[in-house]
Image: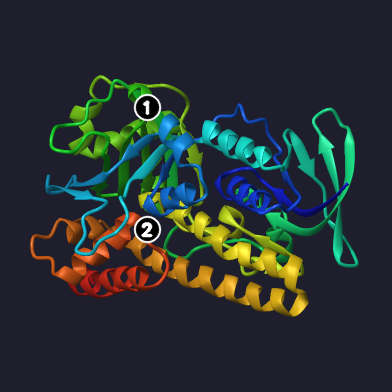
Amino acid sequence: MTFDVVVVGAGLAGGFIAHELAREGRSVALVEREEFARQRPYGWLPVYVANALADAGLAEVMNARYLASTALRVLCARTGRSRVFAYDERTEALRPASALHVARADFDLVLARAAREHGATVYTATRAEDPEPRGDRYALALRGADGKQYQIETRFVIDASGEARWMSARASTPSEREGLDGTVMETHVAYAQPSAGAPSGAADLVSFAHGALWLLPMRGGVHALGAAVSGAWAAQRKAAEGPEEFFDRTVRDATILRGALTRSQRLHAVHTRVPVATKVERRAGERWIAVGAAGGTVDPVLGMDAALAMLSVRQGLAVVRAALDDGDAAEFDARARFEQAMDDAEFNCERVARSVYRGALADALLSADLSRAERAAIRAVIRCELEGEPAELAASFVSDRLASAFG
């Protein structure tokens, strides 16, 4: 079989870009190496991502299945201060703003089904083998769990394989981002009781001595509980301490959450991810691009990884269209703009992420004397607006205010 595009990896980036290309009438294959009944961590999809899903015609199914959140509460475990930021807090007219709290295993399946409804071919429990260039196409072997092999060809390959980096790792070796050598730990809990003072459905972001924690309400009374901790704190894990014990000790260290979690019950094993942030030098090549985590990650706090994944899809669509419709020269120009846009966005997000680990971002957000411009920058930070003026405001806020206040 021959396709216009083969997408490897059916997470947020892979499922969404397959959906969009199929909706345009392209012939698309979406290849996922696992079954969709898999344990995946929570999904905190910021406003930027929720808006993109709505623009793609997916608002109805998303709002029916997942919790829409309109605010974020920032708490400081060191001082006990807290403040609520509504996502639609603004001085100018914008569309209604809400984030989505999703169950990732289910969410990935919903995206794949939506892509299939538009004509995409979806392979699950199937591995894509090394692509072989053949003129203006790639030949790929797809191997199912039963060992059966399929031979396909495609005009363009999209690597959305996440940390597996199916194709991008062949072009450049992934490396850790300097200063973001932390660890992320995630689980789900029942019977959490967040303290009063935040709107219904609001996420709690807690700054504490070793990084940040979040308590994220989901449908059905379940909360996602996660921690992004510095490498220095991760190194304090005791020799006989398992991941669950270390996670529990980490959460207890942020005393401001103790009341909310007194009667909580962990529902499954802790999911751990190390390192927090990685980078690849090349995220595009001859008739291929890497989107989502396959092109590098920054940090999951504030949903930045999800927002960057969606930005890479939106930028990457221009590359694919140029390759399929306009020829090699247009594709090359689109690839260059794609890589530059992602480099710029990730640079801004790195600065925000570093301030989270230092505890400086919470101190700045909880400050009582914020100017109009700084409030606009806060909106850009918590909504992950990554293109145009909002990104510049956020970068300026993080660089100037935090540098002067905290060194």
Disc sitting over residue 384 in the figure: 2
Residue beneath label 1, please? 219
Q: Against 160, is 217 above or below?
A: above
> Which amino acid type is marked by label 2?
Cys
Residue 271 x %, y %: 49, 35
Residue 382 or residue 353, whichever sits in front: 382
Q: Is residue 60 left or right of residue 83?
A: right
Q: Against 262, is 56 above or below?
A: below
- Residue name at image x 27 percent, y 25 percent: 192
Question: Which label's residue is closer to the chain start, 2 or 1?
Answer: 1
Q: Is residue 304 left or right of residue 98?
A: right
Other-residue count near label 1 (Cα within 10 Å), few / some / many at <14 / 14–19 / ≥20: some
Disc sitting over residue 227 in the figure: none
- Residue 182 in view: no
Q: Against 52, is 124 above or below?
A: above
- Residue name at image x 77 percent, y 37 percent: 126
Residue 194 or residue 150, whichever sits in front: 150
For the image shown, how many numbered marks are present on the structure?
Answer: 2
Quadrant placement of the C terminus: bottom left
> Which amino acid type is marked by label 1?
Arg
Residue 249 x %, y %: 32, 33
Extreme residue in the left direction: 368
- Residue 256 in view: yes
Residue 230 or residue 258, whichever sits in front: 258
Residue 74 x %, y %: 21, 48
Q: CA distance from mark 2 to mark 1?
A: 23 Å
Q: How is the image coloured?
A: rainbow
- Residue name at image x 55 percent, y 61 percent: 314
The picture quadrant where one finds residue 379 is bottom left
The picture quadrant where one finds residue 402 is bottom left
Label 1 sits on a secondary structure element that is helix
